[in-house]
């Protein structure tokens, strides 16, 4: 490996630690929950370790694996996240995705528990970034049930709720995937508060069309699905 690749890897590990702190500080992950990964080449992925708080990681905990989930460079007895199969499935399904983040943000997760997809378009930034957010059926963590359940939903969406579990966001890089998690949680939070106030006004379809034109002009990367608008 050349020095440029090593520097890039170190830089990505630093970003992973920083995003771990943000996830934990904002209450998006409890205890040792949550995980994230970044694709560093066609066959190599950096992923967070199992059994560690994502707010208190160090660089030596980050693990490099191949596309079969095998550890390339073992370190200090840490093993990859138990949700490694979910991350690998995303990379197999989406060539354009370079980073995956999974967390349990309370408002998003409450929609996933209530079985209510975020299919009401109420906030401009959220519409342009996420579109509608579907719910993948429940699957047992760490098994192939979750990777199998997300396949149809990640084809057209970079943000998916996992029934009775949490949320998954994708991006062309770690920061983009993280920002989608923040936007998703912010949106779920606002909709929850509006429901509490007794009314949710939706942005009309013709206004949504205008936002989609702006999105195209801005060349925002990623996929959004508006087919299930309510
Ligand atoms: Zn989880």
Image (cartoon, rainbow, N blue to C red):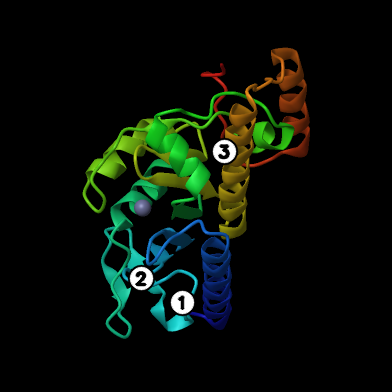
Residue 96 seen by the camera:
no
In the figure, 215 relative to 202: above or below?
below
- Residue drawn at (43%, 58%) of the image: 42
Checking the image for residue 49, the label placed there is 2
In the figure, 17 relative to 162: above or below?
below
Quadrant housing residue 221: top right
Spatial CA span between label 3 and label 2: 28 Å
Quadrant housing residue 7: bottom right
Q: Position of residue 131 (x, y in %)?
A: 60, 30
Q: Which is more N-terminal, label 3 or label 1? A: 1
215 and 189: which is toward the camera: 189
**Label 1 residue near ligand 1, CB within 8 Å:** no
Residue contact between numbered discs 2 and 1, judged by CB atoms under 8 Å: yes
Residue 19 seen by the camera:
yes
Residue identifier under label 3: 188
Quadrant housing residue 208: top right
Q: Which is more N-terminal, label 2 or label 3? A: 2
Q: Position of residue 159 (x, y in %)?
A: 51, 40
Residue identifier under label 1: 57
- Residue drawn at (56%, 59%) of the image: 174
Q: Position of residue 23 (x, y in %)?
A: 53, 61
- Residue drawn at (66%, 31%) of the image: 127
In the figure, 49 relative to 75: above or below?
above
């Amino acid at each position: 490996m050349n020095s440029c690749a090593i520097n890039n890897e170190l830089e990505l590990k630093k970003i992973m630690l920083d995003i771990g702190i943000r996830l934990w500080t904002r209450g998006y992950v409890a205890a040792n929950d949550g995980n994230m990964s970044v694709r560093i080449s066609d066959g190599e992925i950096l992923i967070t370790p199992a059994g560690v708080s994502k707010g208190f990681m160090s660089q030596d905990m980050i693990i490099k694996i191949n596309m079969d989930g095998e550890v390339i460079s073992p370190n200090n007895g840490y093993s990859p996240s138990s949700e490694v199969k979910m991350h690998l499935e995303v990379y197999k399904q989406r060539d354009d995705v370079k980073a995956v983040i999974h967390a349990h943000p309370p408002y998003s997760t409450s929609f996933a528990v209530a079985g209510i997809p975020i299919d009401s378009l109420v906030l401009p930034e959220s519409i342009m970034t996420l579109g509608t957010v579907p719910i993948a059926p429940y699957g047992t963590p760490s098994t192939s049930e979750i990777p199998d359940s997300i396949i149809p939903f990640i084809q057209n969406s970079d943000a998916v709720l996992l029934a009775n579990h949490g949320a998954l966001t994708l991006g062309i890089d770690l920061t983009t995937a993280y920002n989608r998690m923040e936007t998703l949680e912010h949106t779920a939070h606002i909709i929850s508060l509006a429901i509490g106030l007794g009314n949710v006004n939706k942005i009309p379809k013709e206004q949504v069309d205008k936002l989609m034109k702006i999105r195209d002009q801005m060349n925002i990367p990623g996929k959004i699905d508006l087919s299930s608008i309510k």
